Amino acid sequence: MKLWIQGARPKTLPAAIAPVVVGAACAQVENSTQNNWSNAFLALIVSLALQIAVNFANDYSDGIRGTDKNRVGPLRLVGSGAKKPADVKRATFLAFGVAAAFGFVLAASTSWWLLLVGVFCFLAGWYYTGGKNPYGYMGLGEVFVFVFFGVVATMGTTFVISESLSRDSFFASVVVGCLACALLAVNNLRDIAGDTVAGKRTLAVRIGETNARKFFIALFVVAGFAIALIGLSHPTALIALLGLAAAARPIKRVVSGATGPDLIEVLVMTGRVQIIVAITLSVGLLIS
């Protein structure tokens, strides 16, 4: 069980929790009398299950390709030989199944169009590193993370609660998406050497180490601008900028040239920033 928990990559789960917290706050701001708060809990289960499914899918696909043979980061179940590929594949589809089951309930209570969104989420999660031409190997992983763990997850949560969307929920989804991308960016920065040898052309590999570090910083800058735009209609939401200030530590580490194992701690710090910003942004919205 300990190995399976490690394989689920708990340190990445803030990327699944943050959009639900922020999306729920955006729904409350709408002041709808029809808000269905039980759907927030279902959305959280779907988001966590999808994150875990993607993590297992990545472990399985990279493992059978041999990409994880010379990893610097945490344990990978297939690459290390700790678990059989078939078992990890089954765990992947089990997690997808959990997401599908609870997603179906959400669709039934709101809109059947959510089923189509769910299909795209599953396909994007599997083909990130799976299939013959995984888009994660072409430097498009950040696009997937921004769209599905940022825009779709945040605005989707708002929709299943209030059955409405707003400009603020979009800007909030940009904040969440940028911080989720920051997690992937530092992960790919850490793995540049191994991914280059394995032929995995992540964005970090494509643009080079120096630009990858700049990209990491730029994500926080864009998140800050998005928070400022939300502040135009909800001034108290600007307290999220104080939360974003927590990014100073991981940014300092990245700027100073941290590599390999040192970036594992940066990954933890980045996840912490994501949660802090999600909480402060949500509180700011709720008291506006």
Image (cartoon, rainbow, N blue to C red):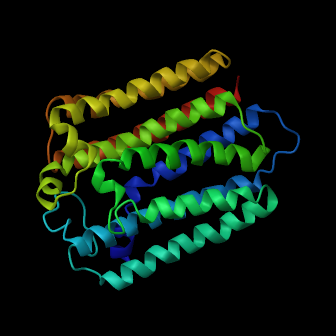
Which residue sits at x=73%, y=60%?
A: 106
Horizontal relation, residue 129 to residue 68: left or right: right
Quadrant into which the N terminus falls: bottom left
Q: Nearer the viewer, residue 165 or 237?
A: 165
Q: Quick check: can you spot residue 45? A: no
Quadrant into which the C terminus falls: top right
Give how far across and how far down residue 28 sits, in percent: 75, 37
Q: Nearer the viewer, residue 270 or 104?
A: 104
Which residue sits at x=84%, y=37%?
A: 32
Vertical side of 88 occupied by 254: above or below: above
Which residue sits at x=50%, y=33%?
A: 175
Vertical side of 209 occupied by 190: above or below: below
Give how far across and how far down residue 42 sits, in percent: 68, 60
Q: Residue furthest right?
A: 33
Q: Quadrant of residue 180?
A: top left
Which residue sits at x=30%, y=47%?
A: 139
Q: Quadrant of residue 208?
A: top left
User: Disc count in the image?
Assistant: 0
Q: Quick check: can you spot residue 77? A: yes
Give how far across and how far down residue 11 sits, in percent: 38, 54
Give how far across and how far down residue 262 sits, in percent: 17, 45
Vertical side of 7 occupied by 204: above or below: above
